[in-house]
């Protein structure tokens, strides 16, 4: 029996195993209305049948201009919420727990009519210069997060993940590289955290499901210019105190640059284990964790509490069954008897 594939009670969730489908934008909303399409039902449904313990639905914009691209999902209106409920019900019926990642792309919104960010600093030459958000805009975007969370809760999700990583709006507020504000939302680490804190507190007022946040623990920048690992740990402690149930640790995306560390299997795990030193809530690992033995080792050695799988589960929907075979975990059961027959190769 492996830790990877055995059931667990974690972050307020009862999961069939510790494999989580990482949030991954599918860019499949052809009508650009933010509404789920048949593709999404088939894509997420297949991963539920494949027994992913928790499925995190891709980055979903809380406002039209908060989408990474116009082909992203949205959750700012009731039509989007109605379809979300159908997807959540379907995934529950197939046996998975369901989460959704809510985000605002800020200065990285590719098709925004009005580009906004913590400060007026463009991401790269290919992006426009965003407007530094006014207090009214801060309040409006925070309210949009809360309204989207309420819609997600009504749709029945078990978990909401705030997208605080990869250089999107929450990340833009958190980092001194992208936040040069001189008001209550800028300056000290505590001030840069305020934007996220207020969103979390407001969501916590009405949502009692599992509330996660994804963070990028390095921007691959000079250490004296970016938040240090100790500062991220301080943020982790504040997040725990403010009601976050799990921290999903990633890296990069804030600046237009490639990783300055070797990108090899498990390359982000040291950031996960560093965060685990600071908090008592669960912390997840993601990034090139295709090898089931490596995943099991990371869990056994308590470097992470859950494993997120991204590209491996796009490439191979049968990743969990293959992992069971590799780990010789005979307790893992594929979806049904017919799928069991499918596992027999002769
Ligand atoms: C097609 C694609 C879309 C992605 N979209 C998102 C997203 O919506 N939100 C997010 O936080 N990360 C996103 N990511 C990053 C993944 O969640 C994950 O962190 C990354 O792919 C590394 O994990 P992996 O090696 O298992 O793929 C995306 C990655 C891919 C490949």
Image (spheres, rainbow, N blue to C red):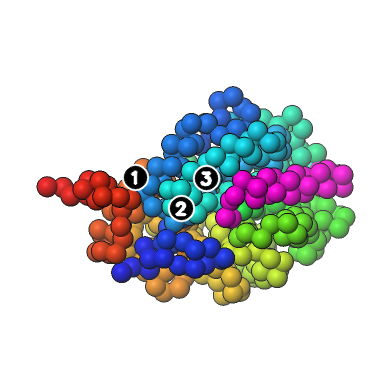
Q: Is residue 220 visible?
A: no
Which element carries disc 1, helix, strand or loop? loop
Front: mark 2 or 1: 2
Q: Is residue 253 above or below residue 279?
A: above
Furthest-top residue in view?
A: 31
Q: Is residue 5 visible?
A: yes
Label 2, label 3: how many angstroms apart (C-alpha)? 10 Å
Quarter of the figure that contains the N terminus? bottom left
Q: Is residue 329 above or below residue 257?
A: below
Spot occupied by residue 179 in the image (x, y as percentages of width and height): 76, 52
Residue 96: which disc?
2
- Residue 71 occupies quadrant: top right
Label 2, label 1: how many angstroms apart (C-alpha)? 18 Å
Nearest to N terminus: mark 3 or mark 1: 3
Which element carries disc 2, helix, strand or loop? loop
Spot occupied by residue 221 in the image (x, y as percentages of width and height): 61, 55
Q: Which residues are magenta?
A: 132-159
Magenta stretch: includes residue 138? yes
Nearest the viewer among 254 and 195 is: 195
For mark 3, what is the residue?
89
Residue 48: which disc?
none
Q: Is residue 294 rendered to the left or right of residue 118?
A: left
Nearest the viewer among 151 and 118 is: 151
**Residue at the image point whose x is 34% and y is 54% from the top:** 320
For mark 1, what is the residue?
316
Nearest to N terminus: mark 2 or mark 3: 3
- Local packing at callout 1 (Cα closer than 10 Å; few below 14, some 14-19, many 20+) is few
**Residue at the image point whose x is 74% and y is 29% from the top:** 113
């Amino acid at each position: 029996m492996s830790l990877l594939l055995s059931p667990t009670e974690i972050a307020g969730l009862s999961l069939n195993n510790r494999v989580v489908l990482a949030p991954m934008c599918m860019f499949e909303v052809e009508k650009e209305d933010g509404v789920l399409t048949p593709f999404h039902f088939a894509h997420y449904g297949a991963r539920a049948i494949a027994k992913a313990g928790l499925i995190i639905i891709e980055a979903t914009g809380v406002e039209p201009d908060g989408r990474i691209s116009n082909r992203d999902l949205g959750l700012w209106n009731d039509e989007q919420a109605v379809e979300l409920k159908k997807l959540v019900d379907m995934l529950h019926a197939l046996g998975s727990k369901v989460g959704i990642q809510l985000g605002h792309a800020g200065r990285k919104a590719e098709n925004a009519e009005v580009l906004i960010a913590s400060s007026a600093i463009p991401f790269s030459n290919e992006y426009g210069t965003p407007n530094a958000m006014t207090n009214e805009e801060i309040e409006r975007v925070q309210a949009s997060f809360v309204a989207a969370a309420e819609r997600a809760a009504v749709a029945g999700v078990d978990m909401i993940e705030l997208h605080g990583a990869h250089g999107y709006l929450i990340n833009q507020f958190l980092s001194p590289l992208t936040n040069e504000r001189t008001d209550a939302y800028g300056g000290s680490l505590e001030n840069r955290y305020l934007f996220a804190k207020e969103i979390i507190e407001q969501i916590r007022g009405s949502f009692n499901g599992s509330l996660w946040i994804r963070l990028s623990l390095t921007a691959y920048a000079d250490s004296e210019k970016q938040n240090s690992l100790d500062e991220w740990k301080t943020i982790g402690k504040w997040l725990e105190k403010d009601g976050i149930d799990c921290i999903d640790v990633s890296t990069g995306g804030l600046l237009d640059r490639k990783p300055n560390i070797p990108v090899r299997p498990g390359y982000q795990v040291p950031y996960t284990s560093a965060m685990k030193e600071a908090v008592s809530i669960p912390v997840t690992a993601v990034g090139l964790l295709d090898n089931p033995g490596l995943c099991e080792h990371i869990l056994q050695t308590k470097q992470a509490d859950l494993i997120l799988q991204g590209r491996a589960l796009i490439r191979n929907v049968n990743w969990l069954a293959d992992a069971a075979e590799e780990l010789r975990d005979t307790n893992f059961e594929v979806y049904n008897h017919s799928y069991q027959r499918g596992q027999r190769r002769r």
